[in-house]
Image: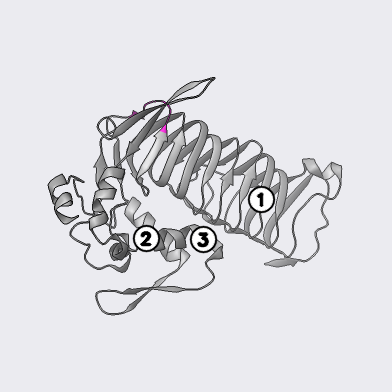
Amino acid sequence: MKELKEIRFNESNIQLKDNLVRSAILPEKAAELNRSITIQGNTVVEGAVYAHKLEIQNGDLEIQGAVFTQLELYVNSEAKGNITFKKSVGSAHSIVSRTPNCKITFYSDINAKSVTLYNAFVAGSIYADEIILENSIVIGGVFATQEIDLTNSIIGTFNTPSARIAQTISLLLPSAFSIEKIIATADAKLFNLSLADLGALYKGIPQSPNSGKIEMDINTDEVKTTLVNEDIQKTLHSYTVIGKVLAADLIDTDKFQNHFLLTAASLGSQLLKTYDMGVDNDGNPVALTFEKIQDFFFNILLGKIEIQSIDGKFDISEITGRL
């Protein structure tokens, strides 16, 4: 890998391959605002990056500073390897990655007009007008001003005017919101993992008997709320298991270690030390690292780790009897 300590490029285009860039790639004059960057693989950039268009033709790539593009951040559909963004990524227009053979990781938030991600892991949240996710994991929220399209993904929550879901969608938090009713394909299933014993699954030990995923019915688990002020009236659809989660407060959910696990995942590159989650079945300590958390959630997504199911039903007399 060739080390580049000082950036001296032409004003129209930058091509990087087998390079270690020790500085940021930022425009220094007006003519460089329209400069495009093409990354052909095996590149590390230690600073921030600004480009009119950033095209990633192949991995491996690591950008340690923030990234912003005026037109587009595009990952070639045939790209392979690992692509990592250590800080926030934004675009005035679009961020697109449809490659099936590339491991793309965002350690922080994404903000753009349009976001399309396949096989991606996002430690933060996504903010956009339109969002398409497939085979992806978002630890935070998916927030769209127009619509989201989710296929076989795990997300924290979502808030959008319009949502479409396909295959299996899992929520890490108790509730999600849309203005219009969710559109679901015939094979779509919506699960909530807020009562899953993620800590036990991470350590590879038996799950707690009162834990598990809850299959949500987009009709019966929907709460419709009308918000009114002097000027407008808006209807909001909430898809929630919050009542079941509140009832589960009678269970010691702290031992699930879900909050600790999700917080560690959301810290991304700010997770400065390796924590201990306890011990596995063999009595060996289980380290908590960002890479292991990422692999853990993808193993859930791909069905390699199976979460037991609970129906989420409870008897109100059992609750009042314990108060």
Element type at marker 2? helix
Q: Give whichever of 57, 310 is nearer the camera.
A: 310
Number of other residues with Cα within 10 Å of mark 2, as a class: few under 14, some 14 to 19, many 20 or more: some
* Spatial separation of the CA atoms under disc 3 and disc 1: 18 Å
Q: Quadrant of the N terminus?
A: bottom right
Tag nearer the camera, 3 or 1: 3
Q: Which mark is residue 267?
A: 3
Residue 67 disc label: 1
In the rendering, at what x and y percent does residue 55 appear?
64, 45
Secondary element type, mark 1:
strand
Q: Give the amino acid type for the residue marked by disc 3 in the picture.
A: Leu
Measured along the vertical axis of the image, is residue 38 above or below residue 266? above
Instruction: Report how far apart the C-alphas of labels 2 and 1 lie in the structure.
Output: 27 Å
Q: Tell me if 24 is positioned left or right of 163 in this view.
A: right
Q: Which label's residue is closer to the chain start, 2 or 1?
A: 1
Q: Which residue is mark 2?
A: 296
- Numbered disc 3: secondary structure: helix
Camera-near label (2 vs 3) is: 3
Where residue 315 appears, as percent x and y from the top left, is 14, 46
251 horizontally vs 12: left or right: left
Q: Is residue 295 visible?
A: no
Mark 3 or 1, nearer chain start: 1
Where residue 300 sits, quadrant-wise, is: bottom left
User: What's the colour scheme?
Assistant: one colour
Residue in view at x 73 percent, y 65 percent: 22
Instruction: Identify the amino acid type marked 1.
Output: Val
Q: Which residues are magenta?
A: 178-184
